[in-house]
Amino acid sequence: MARKIHPRVWIQPSGYVSGTFFLLLAALVPLSWHWGTSSPSWKLDQIWVLGAELRPEGFYRAFFEPDSALATYQVDLPPLLDSLERDPYVKGARVSHVFPDVIKLELVERRPLAALNTHPILLIDEEGVILPMTDPKLLTRVPMLSNMNTAPELYPIGEQTLSVKVLDAVHLLATVQNEFPRLYRELSGIRFNPRDEVEMILTEHPTRIFLGAEDFRRKIISLREFRRALPTGVSLSSFQSLDLRFAKQIVAKEWM
């Protein structure tokens, strides 16, 4: 028996039905937007700040205050990231949404390597970038650099110093921090003498270490080996001065 095939019938929707559908759709869009912005689960509720050590977390959260009434997904992150990265202490940052109600901020801050004896006192990092003084306690953690040109135009905030001499001192300090970290912790300051030679001053007594004007890395390594060879109970601060300006020798002067 042959199978009877029924023809398919297509029903063309009337203009009335189509119009009603699009009207409903148009009404749902603003309603859904209103629900998203008013629903507590989508409101910007928390800002996680990771990596803030030199500035308080509240300082970074303040960047988001103008957007606090928005839903999380409405916060435009790229302009916020640009604003954050213009801060002198921010070396790098990443901002991301954590749905439904969190924004996560990850930071890499610039760490001061030394203080500059300018007016006002400024800080400088290992890349020579100038930082404002935000916490006087930082002065107890880094050595002071002095006896250099203090003209304000040489130290633009958030940019690399324009002083070649200061950059040389920064490179020296970075070498000390990497090759002889104990010496870096014991440093009170670094200064330039009238011949543009570098002198380091230790916190205790204070011992003066004369480095001359060149070949700093070799001299720092020699000083480290000299320190390791000292007998128990004797340290660098046991000497009044240590002179490394002579080839392949350290001239040590004891306290009188």
Image (cartoon, helix red, strand yellow):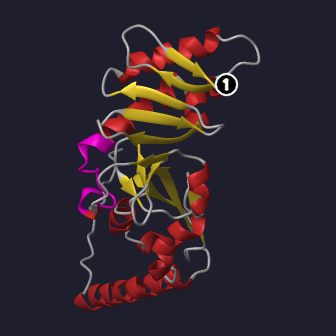
Visible residue check, residue 53: no
Quarter holding residue 173: top left
Picture quarter with the C terminus: top right
For the residue pair 161 and 55, the one nearer the viewer reads as 161
Q: Which residues are magenta?
A: 153-166
Instruction: Say if the magenta span includes residue 233.
Output: no
Visible residue check, residue 67: yes
Picture residue at 29% right of the left edge, 60% below the top: 156
For the residue pair 52 and 4, the one nearer the viewer reads as 52
Q: Position of residue 94 (x, y in %)?
A: 43, 53
**Number of numbered discs:** 1
Q: Is residue 238 above or below residue 225?
A: below
Picture residue at 33% right of the left edge, 49% below the top: 148
SS majority, magenta:
loop
Quarter holding residue 73: bottom left
Q: Position of residue 220 (x, y in %)?
A: 46, 21
Picture residue at 49% right of the left edge, 15% below the top: 251
For the residue pair 23 and 188, the one nearer the viewer reads as 188
Picture residue at 62% right of the left edge, 40% below the top: 203
| Badge 1 density bin: few <14, some 14–19, many ≥20, Cα 10 Å | some
Q: Is residue 134 above or below residue 35?
A: above
Q: Position of residue 132 (x, y in %)?
A: 43, 62
Label 1 sits on a secondary structure element that is helix
- The residue where tag 1 is placed is 238
Q: Is residue 76 above or below residue 171?
A: below
Q: Residue furthest front?
A: 256
